[in-house]
Image (tube, rainbow, N blue to C red):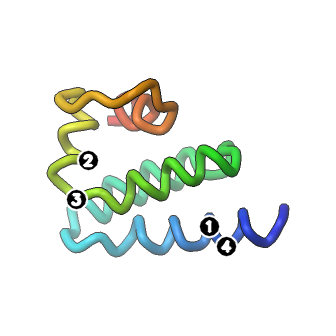
Amino acid sequence: MNSNKQNLINKILYRSQYRGTKEMDIFVSRFVKSIIDSLSFDDLKDLDLLINMNDEDILKISKNELSFKNNKIFKLLIDFK
């Protein structure tokens, strides 16, 4: 695995655990840990965008109340909930 991909994985794992609210920390970190090993570098970039969204938008995505373009990560989040 190249170092850029591993650096992005480390960044995503850290950020997913320290979002601000404990409930979202738990939800997002469990989601990230369940999918991160199977993602391509491009998917990791999308995941990085997702985990940097505010909590309200992530909840809306997980409840399928907020739609996005055909994005693999958002579909995985909807399925995860």
Q: Nearer the viewer, residue 4 or 79?
A: 4
> Residue 35: percent from the left, percent from the top?
56, 45
Q: Residue furthest right?
A: 1
Residue drawn at 34 percent across, 75 percent down: 18
Residue that numbered label 1 is attached to:
8
Dividing the image into 4 quarters, which one contains the N terminus?
Answer: bottom right
Residue that numbered label 2 is attached to:
58
Disc with the residue nearer the chain's start (4 vs 2) = 4
Q: Nearer the viewer, residue 53 or 76?
A: 53
Q: Which secondary structure lies at badge 4?
A: helix
> Residue 8: percent from the left, percent from the top?
62, 67
Disc with the residue nearer the chain's start (3 vs 1) = 1
Which numbered tag is attached to residue 7? 4
Residue drawn at 60 percent across, 44 percent down: 43
Would you say 6 lies left or right of 18 here?
Answer: right
Q: Which secondary structure lies at badge 1?
A: helix
What type is the residue that disc 3 sits on?
A: Asn
> Cβ–Cβ below 8 Å for labels 2 and 3?
yes
Residue drawn at 39 percent across, 51 percent down: 50
Q: CA distance from mark 1 to mark 2?
A: 20 Å
Would you say 54 lies left or right of 42 here?
Answer: left
> Cβ–Cβ below 8 Å for labels 4 and 1?
yes
The quadrant in which residue 16 appears is bottom left
Residue that numbered label 3 is attached to:
54
> Cβ–Cβ below 8 Å for labels 4 and 3?
no
Disc with the residue nearer the chain's start (1 vs 2) = 1
